[in-house]
């Protein structure tokens, strides 16, 4: 019944995730996923109609983990600006510790979505992405209220999107272009620290604090 469906669904996504971490998404096949999950290939297609559909389920899982990490990172920070910085650093840690999750999100972001998500797994992805975004918006709002973030910041959703785009791109460059960056005489950790300082300066009501 319903429980068995849920169990099978999880087994398929678990198998896909393990393979993703081992060989990278491009090399993963539905056959391998079925074998790893110990299910027939036909059954896997009952749950996910193709590899792209299965990818959405992995992105949803990645985004749920990211949201948990964002919430945990800001928990012990009182001021909004400190929460926002903690969230940014948690994103960096997420990419370091779970590179296949970060890659799943990056592929999802690079994929040109249709006007409206029609597949249930794609809709679930969009919902998970929205919940991640809400955490950032909430901390920006707190910073406005407590006076740690400058009052003229404008639309908080736009600000949250810009912060996400900035940090996402930064992390991607740090991962993919580390060798080139270091050839310029810049260490990647230094680039990250300077970038966080720059973001903080842009957001802070009083940059000296």
Image: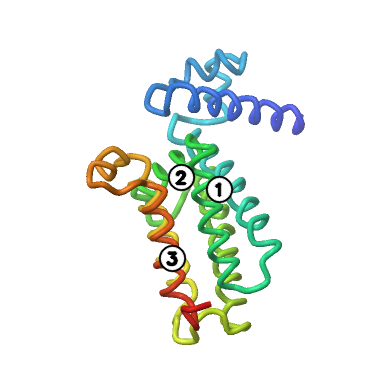
Q: Where is residue 40 in the image (x, y as percent from the top left)?
A: 57, 14
In the displayed structure, does residue 151 sit left or right of residue 65? Answer: left
> Mark 1 to mark 3: distance in Å?
25 Å
- Residue wearing tag 3: 197
Seen from the viewer's position, the closer of residues 108 and 72 is 72
Task: Determine the secondary structure under disc 3.
Answer: helix
- Asked which quadrant contains residue 120, the reply is top right
- Residue wearing tag 2: 105
**In which quadrant is the N terminus drawn?**
top right
**Does 122 appear above or below 129?**
above
Crowding at mark 3 (Cα within 10 Å: few <14, some 14-19, many 20+): few
Crowding at mark 2 (Cα within 10 Å: few <14, some 14-19, many 20+): many
Task: Determine the secondary structure under disc 1.
Answer: helix
- Residue wearing tag 1: 63
Please tell me which residue is depicted at 70% across the width and 61% down the height of the picture: 75
Crowding at mark 1 (Cα within 10 Å: few <14, some 14-19, many 20+): many
> Mark 2 to mark 3: distance in Å?
25 Å
> Mark 2 to mark 1: distance in Å?
7 Å
Of pointers 2 and 3, the one earlier in the residue sequence: 2
Find out whether the residues at labels 2 and 3 contact each other: C-beta distance under 8 Å.
no
Find out whether the residues at labels 2 and 1 contact each other: C-beta distance under 8 Å.
yes
């Amino acid at each position: 019944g319903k429980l068995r469906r849920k169990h099978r669904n999880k087994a398929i996504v678990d198998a896909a995730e393990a393979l993703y971490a081992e060989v990278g998404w491009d090399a993963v096949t539905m056959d391998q996923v079925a074998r790893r999950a110990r299910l027939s290939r036909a059954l896997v297609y009952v749950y996910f109609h193709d590899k792209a559909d299965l990818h959405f389920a992995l992105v949803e899982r990645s985004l749920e983990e990211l949201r948990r990490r964002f919430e945990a990172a800001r928990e012990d920070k009182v001021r909004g600006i400190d929460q926002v910085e903690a969230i940014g650093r948690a994103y960096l840690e997420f990419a370091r510790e779970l590179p296949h999750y970060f890659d799943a999100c990056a592929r999802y972001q690079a994929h040109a979505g249709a006007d409206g998500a029609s597949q249930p797994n794609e809709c679930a992805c969009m919902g998970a992405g929205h919940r991640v975004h809400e955490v950032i918006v909430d901390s920006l709002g707190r910073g406005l209220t407590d006076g740690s973030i400058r009052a003229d910041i404008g639309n908080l959703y736009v600000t949250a999107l810009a912060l996400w785009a900035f940090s996402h791109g930064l992390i991607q460059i740090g991962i993919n272009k580390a060798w080139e960056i270091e050839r310029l005489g810049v260490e990647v950790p230094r680039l990250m620290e300077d970038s966080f300082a720059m973001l903080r300066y842009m957001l802070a009501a009083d940059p000296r604090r």
